[in-house]
Structures are given as structure tokens and as C-alpha cells.
Image (cartoon, helix red, strand yellow):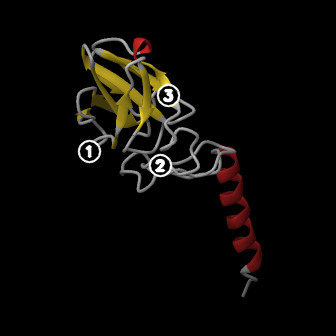
Amino acid sequence: MSDPTPTARRTVLAAGAAVALGGGTLTACGGEAKSPKSEPGSPSTSETAAPSSPAAGTGKALLKSSAVPVGGGTVLKDEKLVVTQPTAGSFRCFTAVCTHQGCLVNKVEAGTIDCPCHGSKFQITDGAVAHGPATRPLAEKQITVAPDGNISLA
């Protein structure tokens, strides 16, 4: 009978190498993310704004309304938010974390918020899925637009 330790050690080493080469997380493109994955070196996040987020509930301006094109939007990568303006003067804010596998969306184009990882697209009006593989909408965030045009989390 052979010693099971060498096989077990090889299995563990191979799995560790796969994780190291794959960026630290093994995932498959088929299921929904239970929680968004964070970028390497950053703390994990959730779909709601964390109290420690600089913009969360502090009234700190995220951006000026003039920076959000009518019929489009602006991705705020550091805040993990996307602010849209579906019609003139109507602003919406959503998490920028895709509900499919937790990637950050990277652009707003042709009426949709687009994820570069697997091609999911979300409506700028309500965050609803316009094109899968995502099946759940982006979580909406409450914002306020001040008379001076500053947009802040509510």
C-alpha cells in the first residue's frame, strides 16, 4: 500500500498554484455571484454602500450633474457606483458591481450599463437586466441633486 501523503500534497500544491495563477479566486462562468468579489488588495464589498465609504451618507459630492450625459451615465470606479441620466434632469444611481460574477461595470453606452467580463448589460432607467448572463438587476442607491448640481448619496 502506498503512502497517501504525496498525492494529497501534490493535489494541494496544484490547487494552490491554480489559485495563485488565477488571481486568488476560482470561479466559473455559469452562476450568479452570491457576493461581489473585490479587486486584489482591496477590502471585500457588498451591494450596499459600506459605512466606511467616503461618500456613504456623508453628503460629500460624488460628481456634478453636468458630468452625467443625458441618455447615458458615468461610472465612478473608486466608489463602485454608476450615475445615470435617462432623461434630462432625471438622475439615478446604482451599484457598479455586476450581479453575475461581481465584476465592475466599465461603461454606459446606448442606454445600457455594460459589464466587460461576460457581456451583461443593465438598463440606465432602473438597473434591470437588458442582456444576460446576469439575471438580477443592479441595486439602486438613493442620491440627492443639490441646486448647485452636486450629486451625493442620500
Residue 3, position in %: x, y?
Answer: 76, 83
Q: Residues within 10 Å of mark 2 (few under 14, many from 20)?
A: some
Q: 64 above or below 129? A: above
Picture disc at residue 62: 3
Q: Name the residue nearer the viewer: 121 or 145.
A: 145
- Mark 1, residue position: 135
- Residue at the location (23% across, 33% down)? 126
What is the crowding at mark 1: few (fewer than 14 residues within 10 Å), some, or many (at least 20)? Answer: some
Q: Is residue 139 left or right of residue 54?
A: left
Secondary structure of residue under mark 2: loop
Which marked residue is nearer to the observer: mark 2 or mark 1? Answer: 2
| Residue 119 in view, yes or no | no
Amino acid under disc 2: Pro
How far apart, in angstroms, are the residues tagged by discs 2 and 1? Answer: 14 Å
Quarter holding the N terminus is: bottom right
Q: Nearer the viewer, residue 146 or 28?
A: 146
Query: Tag 3: Cα neighbours inside 10 Å, few (<14), some, or many (≥20)?
Result: some
Q: Are marks 1 and 3 in contact (CB under 8 Å)?
A: no
- CA gap between label 1 and label 3 equals 28 Å
Q: Looking at the image, which residue is at 52% across and 41% down? A: 58
| Marks 2 & 1, CB-CB < 8 Å contact | no
Pointer 2 residue: 36
Q: How far across and how far down the image is residue 82, in percent?
A: 41, 29
Q: Is residue 8 visible?
A: yes
Residue type, mark 1 in image: Thr
